[in-house]
Image (cartoon, grey):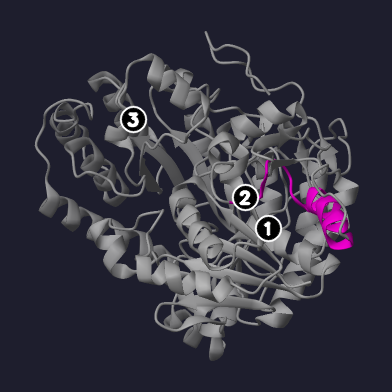
């Protein structure tokens, strides 16, 4: 059966999609992956201007070209996040016009978070939970000519009505161990405007991801931050708060398999939501295997302040961890409580102390996520965030986001209760208005001003809702300095994890990247084992007790998957 899986997003990283496409290819040999990339956003120009935005668009002519490239399949499976929901609708609509008989399913994060919206598209079904086993149940019936509408985790359109099926149990760690490795450099095509779909080439990977490979080891998050799509996952099944993952051996073998296909892979980015919540014994096993069989640098993006521990950082840094990304989001206790994020300022500062002890000798400067331009923030809230970052141990850099409300989340409901007009803030979360407060964030990444200068600068910060001047030229200048300041440490360590393109490939090709990692970059000695602690389950962890609830925050409902990559 001709099955075509279609990913719509900026770039071709698509971690969840690749896992799903590999599983479909296992149960149906005639399966291909199609990537509709709206933009290659990691460019120097976009970095300087701040013009990199998610949810890029295609012209009507390009949508038509994409649709013609998909016609002819027996089954189409679309995957997209909320930022690409409208584009997905347009492509689906045009495919339906060209081929009314093709069966179409919409999966990915948007149908999970907002199924009531996704089911209104011109698809036959949507997947509202974990897709692998649900698709197998659907596909076996579909292929045999039986009624497939009993499959769990699916909503179906049936005789003008919507059939909402119950959720299947979440995958266990043992079941995750049996999944195929994500699809990578096989049976893949990419859309090129004016040319249609063509097989993906090495240059596509180098242009998008450089020498890096993006992976996910664990699934689950104990937090239920209001701005995150994870709240919907937990609402669907409380067990999503648990951390589930296959063995360390499975993860190491996956990276080895990728490097056999793409020997240039010299760095791995782990995008787990809660990597540091994995217990120490399992991280130690992972570190020992990684060091012995891969010995390449890796970054951990899913760092929550509550789970930053010295012993975990030591063992992972010995293995090769050279960069972390931690979610701060705000320095205001009031706003953190509004987000239902139980990481108070003092815990953030304590985590920063641990992280700073590894940089710059062993680590690149850590990256901290900050959410700005929240319409309910007061001037004092904004200044508290700026002051927290001023007090954070250096060095560090920031990823600064303008608040964007994901539909059907607790944050959307809270904003509506407060009378916020969401349309006014429904722009790309990556485009940062050049207001004084935002520009001070860039300044803090470049240099820490003396206190006598910091106080008058801080006094200029205003809440996003206040009338104030913007400074586009100064903003562009500070962004340029910010990028230069960010790139310099990477250049010193010959790390190309944030700079895709052929330059890094050339350095790898002549052997300099490997030489730098082995001979030049400082290596942390093997740390001593920590004091004995109570052992945890080998492959599945129920995070008990959870971090203390935020004062005044109601008990959460119960979820499913994060939409945007903001921790």
Report the front residue among 517 and 251.
Answer: 251
Task: Give the residue at x 35% y 49%.
Answer: 430
Q: Rounded to the nearest whole Å, what is the CA distance between mark 1 and mark 3?
A: 46 Å
Q: Which residue is mark 1?
A: 318
Do we see residue 80 in this rendering? Answer: yes
The picture places residue 405, in percent across and down from the top left corner, at 42, 34
Residue shown at 71%/60% (left/top)?
Answer: 19
Lateral position of residue 518 relative to residue 374, left or right: right
Position of 273 relative to 409 (above/below)? below
Q: CA distance from mark 3 to mark 2?
A: 24 Å
Examine the rendering and report whether any part of residue 525 can be seen: no
Question: Which residue extends farthest top?
Answer: 552
> Residue 483 lies in what quarter of the image?
bottom left
Label 2, on which residue? 108
**Of pointers 3 and 2, the one earlier in the residue sequence:** 2
Residue 337 magenta-highlighted: no
Instruction: Determine the secondary structure under disc 1.
Output: helix
Q: Position of residue 127 (x, y in %)?
A: 69, 45
Label 2 neighbour load within 10 Å: few <14, some 14-19, many 20+: many
Q: Marks 2 and 1: in contact by CB < 8 Å?
A: no
Which residue is at the front of the view, 556 or 363?
556
Q: Earlier in the sequence, mark 1 or mark 3?
A: 1
């Amino acid at each position: 059966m001709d099955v075509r899986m279609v990913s719509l997003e900026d770039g071709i990283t698509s971690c969840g999609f690749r896992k799903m496409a590999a599983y479909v290819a296992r149960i149906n040999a005639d399966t291909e992956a199609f990537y509709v990339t709206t933009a290659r956003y990691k460019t120097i120009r976009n970095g300087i201007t701040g013009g990199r935005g998610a949810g890029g668009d295609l012209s009507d002519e390009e949508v038509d070209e994409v649709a013609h490239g998909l016609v002819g399949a027996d089954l189409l499976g679309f995957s997209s996040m909320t930022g690409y929901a409208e584009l997905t609708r347009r492509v689906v609509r045009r495919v339906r016009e060209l081929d009314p008989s093709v069966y179409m399913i919409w999966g990915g994060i948007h149908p999970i978070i907002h199924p009531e919206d996704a089911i209104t598209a011109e698809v036959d079904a949507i997947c509202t939970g974990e897709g692998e086993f649900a698709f197998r149940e659907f596909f076996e019936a579909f292929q045999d000519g039986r009624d497939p509408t009993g499959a769990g985790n699916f909503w179906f359109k049936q005789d003008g009505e919507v059939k909402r099926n119950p959720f299947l149990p979440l995958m266990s760690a043992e079941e995750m161990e049996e999944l195929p490795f994500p699809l990578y450099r096989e049976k893949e095509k990419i859309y090129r405007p004016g040319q249609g779909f063509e097989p993906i080439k090495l240059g596509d990977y180098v242009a998008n991801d450089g020498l890096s490979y993006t992976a996910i080891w664990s699934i689950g998050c104990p937090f239920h931050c209001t701005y995150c799509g994870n709240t919907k996952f937990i609402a669907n099944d409380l067990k999503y708060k648990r951390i589930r993952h296959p063995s360390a051996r499975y993860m190491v073998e996956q990276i080895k398999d990728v490097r056999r296909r793409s020997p240039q892979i010299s760095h791995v980015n782990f995008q787990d939501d809660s990597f540091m919540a994995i217990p120490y014994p399992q991280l130690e096993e992972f570190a020992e295997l990684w060091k012995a069989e891969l010995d390449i640098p890796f970054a951990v993006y899913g760092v929550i302040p509550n789970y930053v521990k010295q012993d975990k950082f030591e063992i992972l840094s010995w293995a090769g961890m050279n960069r972390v990304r931690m979610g701060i989001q705000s320095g205001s206790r009031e706003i953190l409580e509004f987000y239902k994020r139980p990481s108070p300022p003092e815990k953030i500062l304590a985590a920063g102390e641990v992280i700073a002890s590894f940089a710059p000798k062993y680590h690149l400067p850590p990256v901290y996520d900050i959410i700005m331009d929240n319409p309910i923030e007061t001037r004092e809230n904004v200044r508290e965030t700026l002051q927290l970052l001023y007090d954070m141990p250096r060095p560090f850099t920031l990823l600064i986001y303008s608040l964007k409300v994901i539909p059907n989340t607790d944050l959307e409901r809270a904003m509506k209760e407060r009378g916020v007009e969401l349309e006014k803030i429904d722009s790309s979360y990556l485009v940062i208005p050049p207001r004084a407060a935002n520009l001070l964030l860039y300044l803090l990444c470049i240099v820490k001003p003396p206190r006598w200068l910091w106080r008058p600068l801080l006094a200029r910060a205003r809440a996003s809702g206040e009338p104030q001047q913007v400074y586009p030229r100064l903003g562009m200048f500070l962004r340029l300095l910010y990028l230069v300041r960010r790139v310099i440490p990477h250049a010193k360590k010959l790390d190309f994890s944030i700079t895709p393109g052929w330059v890094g490939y050339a350095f790898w090709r002549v052997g300099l990247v490997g030489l730098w990692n082995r001979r030049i970059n400082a290596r942390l000695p093997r740390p001593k084992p920590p004091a004995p602690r109570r052992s945890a389950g080998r492959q599945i962890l129920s995070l008990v007790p959870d971090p203390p609830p935020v004062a005044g925050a109601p008990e959460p409902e119960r979820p499913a998957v994060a939409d945007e990559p903001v921790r």
